[in-house]
Image (cartoon, rainbow, N blue to C red):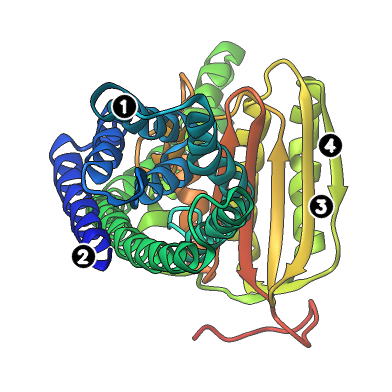
Amino acid sequence: MVLTFLINNLVIIGFMYIRFILNKMMKKNSFLLNSAFFGIMSTFVIMIPFKYNNLIFDLRAVPIIFATYCYGWKVGLIATILPILYRYLFIGDLSTFNIIITITLHFIIPIAVSHYFHKKDSINEHTFLKTKSLLLIAVIYFIIYLVLGIMVQIVPIPLLINISLSLLVFTLISLLVVSYMRNEDIKSSILQLKMVKSEKMEVVSHLAASISHEVRNPLTVVKGFLQLLKKDCPDPKQKEYIEISIQEIDRANDIIINYLTFAKPAPENIKVLNIEEELKRAISIIEPMANMNSIQLNTKIDTHYIQGESQVLQQSLLNILKNSIEAMPNGGSLYIETKREQGRLSIKIEDSGKGMSQAQLSRLGEPYYTTKEEGTGLGMLTAIRIIESFKGKVEVTSTLKKGTTFNIYLPLFIGGNEEAAVTNE
């Protein structure tokens, strides 16, 4: 029995290793690839069973639980049905009762339990598999398995307990190994993405520094001469043209300031800021735009203090608020909330707009990537860089046609007030 379950373990681990290699080669998480692999894996496992009086015991629960939890019910269903078909076609001795018990134990119960725990896991670091939840699912599964076995009494209870404990131990070992492999695969993918993003940011930073020195100075000179010409110009039409030229120079200067955000490592004039005042100032600026788009503003803002530069923080907040409003061209609601969470400030900005797909969400904050027709992709990158310069972070969740939520986390300044000044570290 032990040898059989050990071979089952090796088969499962071998399949998972091959799957991760193929997944890296294909550079995408394919539904067909996952379905085929977990279906074939569970079928291979039942080819090497432990038998007792025409009863079959194996570790097919491992690929089915893992597939259901990590890749969804469709992949889990295929991983459940394929071994049933194999047994029916090549082994036989499969009654309707056996099919019902198999589907219930190997699919319905795991998917119900995993759905609950997957919701819990998504709250904290959703990119990583929560191994503890998988192990708990396996324990619950085998408790039900043991209770059903005792009720049916097909196998002597002492032997059933031994088989169940052996299955549980080897299932836990398999889940630990394959979840560790998946975690390492995810970490490797995230590290690669971070390296690519870091290289892009470095290019933008060098470009920003170059533009700031080479372009802003001549723009300032041109603007000064245009202002002199406007002052002495008697022709109203020419004055209008000069004013338009000055406005365009100001707009070009604003774009350069956006680039400068990437070159500056941190804010220069750090003070203690009252986040309630900062948010209300940003809302007052953005409110006319919200009213024009029939957007209802709802707030729940409390007084908290952070360290930062007011002007730079305003730029970040306005970029995010403006993006949220532009995501609701046909009206909607915008909710802003602040609260203290785990010793830090949490700012929640939630809209009911068109939302983003997972592919769009994964690229949010990349230089020059935007979902808007006339966007440059610099606004959101600027906002994120500013929050990071305050030693904070931005987390974004989104659902298509339902809306997007920005969660901004910033270190709290405890025991200060809005008058206090803090020296830059």
Residue 413 vs residue 406, the one in the foreground: 406
Question: Which of the two discs, 1 and 2, labels the residue nearer the N terminus?
Answer: 2
Q: Looking at the image, is mark 1 or mark 3 earlier in the sequence?
A: 1
Q: Residue at x 44, y 47 (%)?
A: 65
3D distance between C-alphas at marks 1 and 3: 71 Å
Kind of residue at disc 2: Leu
Q: Which mark is residue 297?
A: 4
| Residue at image location 63% in from the left, 22% down from the top | 401
Query: Of marks 2 and 3, which one's residue comes earlier in the chain?
Result: 2
Q: On screen, 139 above or below 295?
A: below
For discs 1 and 4, the disc positioned in front in the rendered view: 1
Amino acid under disc 4: Leu
Determine whether label 2 and label 4 are within 8 Å by CB. Answer: no
Q: Which residue is mark 2?
A: 3
Q: Position of residue 290 (x, y in %)?
A: 77, 29
Report whether 5 appears left or right of 100: left
The residue that mark 3 highlights is 280
| Distance between mark 2 and mark 3 Cα atoms | 68 Å
Question: Which amino acid does the dot numbered 3 rest on?
Answer: Lys
Q: Nearer the viewer, mark 2 or mark 4?
A: 2
Q: SS class of the residue under badge 1?
A: loop
Is residue 229 visible in the rendered image? The answer is no
In front: 120, or 170? 170
